[in-house]
Amino acid sequence: MNDSNLLQQELVQSQAYRDSFKGVTVYGVAGTNGSGKDLLMDLLIEHGFLCFNTSNGIREISQAVFNSIDRGGNDAPLGKVGNAFRVAYPGGMVELGLFKWWTWVSVLPEDLRPKGLVVGSIRGTGEARRLKEFGGRLIVVDADPRVRYERLRGRGRADDNITFEQFAEKEAADMAVGQTDPTKFGMAAVIDAADIRIENNGRDIDAFKAEAVRALGL
């Protein structure tokens, strides 16, 4: 571990770092692919939250390193990059979201601070555990697999141009039923750790937003 790594590890374990989140509303978003996680995060942004989208950064690194943004569990390009962060930090990608708040927001006067922080999407048990250590609440969004598959097909990403059978296979790898290693994908265990659950089986975006507003008390 180099000096930079040691400095970062000292920071995330320090009491001053933890204290900077006292009184801060923190949400983590998790859920199945195509369930509406990004839509929920966009809604929280509309309500004054700072958002850290973990998937965006992972995709950028995966594209640069593997020339691929293929998902499908621990051995896929996205899984390998995400797991490297889970090894590096106690909260994996959640820690980078906390860093964003700590560096961008904690230094600001109260009148310039967002209402809270939302981090998504969470895919490992270590990330869920770290979120809750900082008083965060885990929101899980879900929908019927066929509904989600059609949504993914409609959004136009190259990695979503797959058959339903391939979609189901990738999802099973992401779920990793029984996996609780904090440095690995383990969506099944993350979903079980939900504090708030929101179903999104309909096509009406406004109805989903209204349900989310009700569930979160926004």
Image (cartoon, rainbow, N blue to C red):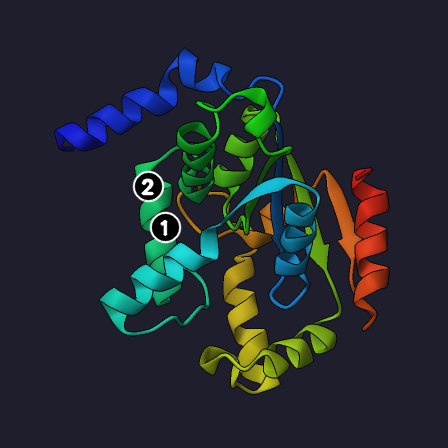
Q: Which picture quadrant has residue 78?
A: bottom left
Q: Which picture quadrant has residue 165?
A: bottom right
101 versus 58 height, above or below: above
Instruction: Report the front residue among 26 and 141.
Output: 26
Compared across the picture, whether 90 is left or right of 218 comes to: left
Instruction: Report the front residue among 43 and 127.
Output: 43
Residue 87 has which mark?
A: 2
57 versus 182 height, above or below: below
Q: Which picture quadrant has residue 182?
A: top left
Q: Identify the residue shown where x is 43% and y is 44%.
A: 93
Task: Tell me residue 33's x, y (percent).
Answer: 60, 65
Q: Are marks 1 and 2 in contact (CB under 8 Å)?
A: yes
Q: Amino acid at mark 2?
A: Val
Task: Tell me residue 125's x, y (percent).
Answer: 52, 41
Which quadrant is home to the C terminus?
top right
Q: Amino acid at mark 1?
A: Asn
Instruction: Report the front residue among 182 and 29.
Output: 29
Residue 46 has which mark?
A: none
Compared across the picture, whether 68 is left or right of 100 comes to: left
**Residue 200 visible in the picture:** yes
Q: Identify the residue shown where x is 28% and y is 28%.
A: 8
**Residue 75 visible in the picture:** no
Task: Tell me residue 18's x, y (percent).
Answer: 47, 18
Other-residue count near label 2 (Cα within 10 Å), few / some / many at <14 / 14–19 / ≥20? some
Secondary structure under tag 2 reads: helix
Count of labels in the image: 2
Q: Which residue is mark 1?
A: 83
Q: Identify the residue shown where x is 67% and y is 59%.
A: 39
148 versus 192 height, above or below: below
116 versus 22 height, above or below: below
Q: Identify the residue shown where x is 21% and y is 26%.
A: 6
